[in-house]
Amino acid sequence: MHTADALEQGETIERLAVLPAWRETTFFTGRERGALMLAEAVALIADGQVPEDVYVSATALLSDGEVAAVTWVAIVINTWNRIATASRYPVGPKQ
């Protein structure tokens, strides 16, 4: 679902393919990398607070509004994923 939506909005298949390895690529801008770093830290919040270095990097690259947006999007998507996992929602091809 998300891949199809991203492609419809003009994202490239190359960037989507390397997204899990965003740290090891040059496909993403500094701002995008800051957003990805923050989103990952928010998704792993059970391990503790967002690390200080991640927060400092994100706030240096993104506006306050962008930090808030990335944080909220990460929280909402993480919530949906937890609901799907807990309810054993089957993930499969679009029919």
Image (tube, rainbow, N blue to C red):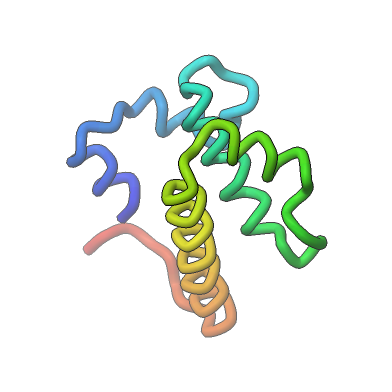
Image quarter of the N terminus: bottom left
Q: In this rendering, would 14 be left or right of 81? A: left
- Give the residue at x 38% y 23%: 14
- Residue 72 point in image, percent of width and height: 48, 62
For the point 57% across and 49% down, the residue is: 39
On the image, the x and y values in percent for residue 50 come to: 73, 54
Residue 16 sits in quarter: top left
**How many numbered discs sit on the rendered protein?**
0
Residue 48 position, x and y percent, is 81, 62
Q: Is residue 33 above or below residue 36?
A: above
Of the 4 image quadrants, the one containing the C terminus is bottom left
**Residue at the spot 44% in from the left edge and 72% down from the top edge:** 90
Indicate whether 95 appears above or below 40.
below
In this view, the residue farthest toward the top is 26
Residue 70 percent location from the top left of the image? 48, 52
Q: Is residue 30 left or right of residue 55?
A: left
Left or right for 56, reference 47: left
